[in-house]
């Protein structure tokens, strides 16, 4: 038994899908990674992502010559209880933009 879809139902379904798609992508639009509660610092030697909570970070420094930001954080798994993660950037401009947002949003 086939059900006929009316033109109105088709338009309403399409409009609903478009609105759901538009509103669900709003969380990702114009949001810098520096505003997230987690710092994504690349991958380890096995390809697993390295992420640390900002609540664990007690100091971060900017290394202009290496185009990187160093995050010093409390690591219970480390021998001395502290570790460093570095986030490397392709350009100085990208690093400076990340730094500005990071300092303002911390």
Image: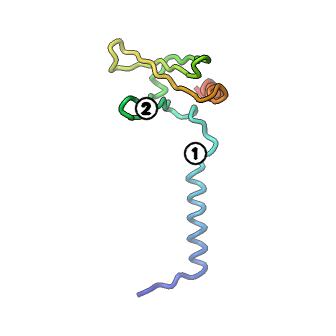
Residue at image position (57%, 19%) is: 66
Report the front residue among 81 and 92.
Answer: 92
Depth check, mark 2 against mark 1: the one in front is: 2
The 10 Å Cα crowd at callout 2, few under 14, some 14 to 19, many 20 or more, is: few
The quadrant in which the N terminus is found is bottom left
What colour scheme has been applied to the protein in the rendered image?
A: rainbow
Q: Position of residue 57 (x, y in %)?
A: 48, 21
State the residue lying farthest toward the bottom. 1
Q: Secondary structure at mark 2?
A: strand
Quadrant of res 104: top right
The 10 Å Cα crowd at callout 1, few under 14, some 14 to 19, many 20 or more, is: few
Q: Earlier in the sequence, mark 2 or mark 1?
A: 1
Report the front residue among 88 and 55.
Answer: 88
Tag count in the figure? 2
**Marking on residue 43:** 2
Above or below, comparing residue 97 to residue 71 in the picture: below
Label 2 with label 1: CB-CB less than 8 Å: no
Mark pair 2, 1: CA separation: 22 Å
Left or right position of 97 against 44? right
Q: Position of residue 26 (x, y in %)?
A: 60, 49
Above or below, comparing residue 16 to residue 99 in the picture: below
**Marking on residue 93:** none
Residue that badge 1 annotates: 28
């Amino acid at each position: 038994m086939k059900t006929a879809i009316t033109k109105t139902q088709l338009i309403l379904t399409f409009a609903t899908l478009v609105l759901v798609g538009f509103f669900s992508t709003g969380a990702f639009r114009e949001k810098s990674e520096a505003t997230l509660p987690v710092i994504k610092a690349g991958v380890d030697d096995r390809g697993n992502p390295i992420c640390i909570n900002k609540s664990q970070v007690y100091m971060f420094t900017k290394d202009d010559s290496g185009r990187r930001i160093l995050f010093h954080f409390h690591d219970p798994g480390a021998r001395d209880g502290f570790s460093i993660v570095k986030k490397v950037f392709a350009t100085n401009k990208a690093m400076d933009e990340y730094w500005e947002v990071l300092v303002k949003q911390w």
